[in-house]
Amino acid sequence: MNLIYNPHLSVDCVVFGFDGEQLKVLLIERHLDHPTDQINDKKLPGSMIYEKESLDAAAARVLNDISGMKNVFLSQFHTFGNPQRTSNPRDLMWLELTTHVKVDRIVTVGYMALMRINRKLTHNNTDESANWYDINDIDSLSLAFDHKDIVISGLEHIRHCSTVEPHLLFQLLPRKFTITQLRKLYDVIYGVKSDVRNFQKKIKQMDCLEETEEFEEGVSHRAARLFKFKKKEI
């Protein structure tokens, strides 16, 4: 089947993960040797959409290519259409060489995705590889297009979503986790320092939190009880 790209529209995914201490964002490292230039920097996972493909389907395809998963949480949050976003000749050259499509101006739709950081990444070819980066290091990294702005906008979106739907945070934690892990995740997303006792009282009142009979293993301190997310019955 011959799939044709739409040369004016793309999707870019801000994929968040949590390693127990820091919030991470998934970036694609792109490398391109060209007679007139060399490209060695990073970009968000993304793609032009196909002519007969919906935006949601394109974003799901991008995430499936990276993780092999078809059920990654996705939330569309903003459209980026500044005419200057493709003003860098190196970005434009890379885009045209990798898609074999003539591009002038392209608008991209941002999606936020949540993924457990221990998920095996399947995206790895000669010119690109996927890796996790600390969200606090974004300013110091060289990112393609306007992807730094998209990451910042995605961070604002995850804060909004987790305020409205707190259960979304559980998608970034192990299937069984401690209250401390949940508190650290909450703190790094919102950039706060929660009071331990107040947080424990507040979080234990959530009807989607289920206490297990299991405790941490292999720790030097007193083992903490493990909890898990309790899905609501419909």
Image: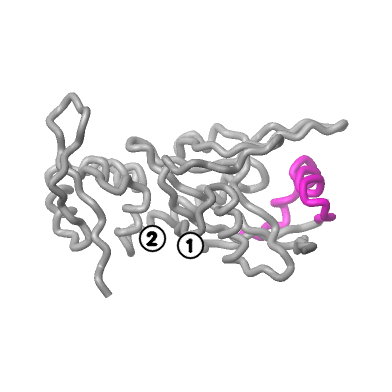
Q: Amino acid at mark 1?
A: Ser
Q: CA distance from mark 2 to mark 1?
A: 9 Å
Between residue 84 and residue 162, name the one nearer to us: 162
Residue underneath mark 2: 161
Q: Residue furthest top?
A: 220
Q: Main secondary structure of the magenta part?
A: helix
Report the quarter where the C terminus lies.
bottom left
Between residue 143 and residue 169, name the one nearer to us: 169
- Secondary structure, mark 1, is strand
Q: Which residues make up the magenta segment?
A: 80-103
Residues marked 2 and 1 touching at CB (< 8 Å): yes
**Residue 195 placement, left or right of 170:** left
Residue underneath mark 1: 75
**Residue 145 placement, left or right of 64:** right
Q: Is residue 48 magenta?
A: no
Residue visible at 20% across and 56% down in the picture: 209
Residue visible at 30% across and 59% down in the picture: 167
Number of the label disc, if any, that sits on residue 64: none
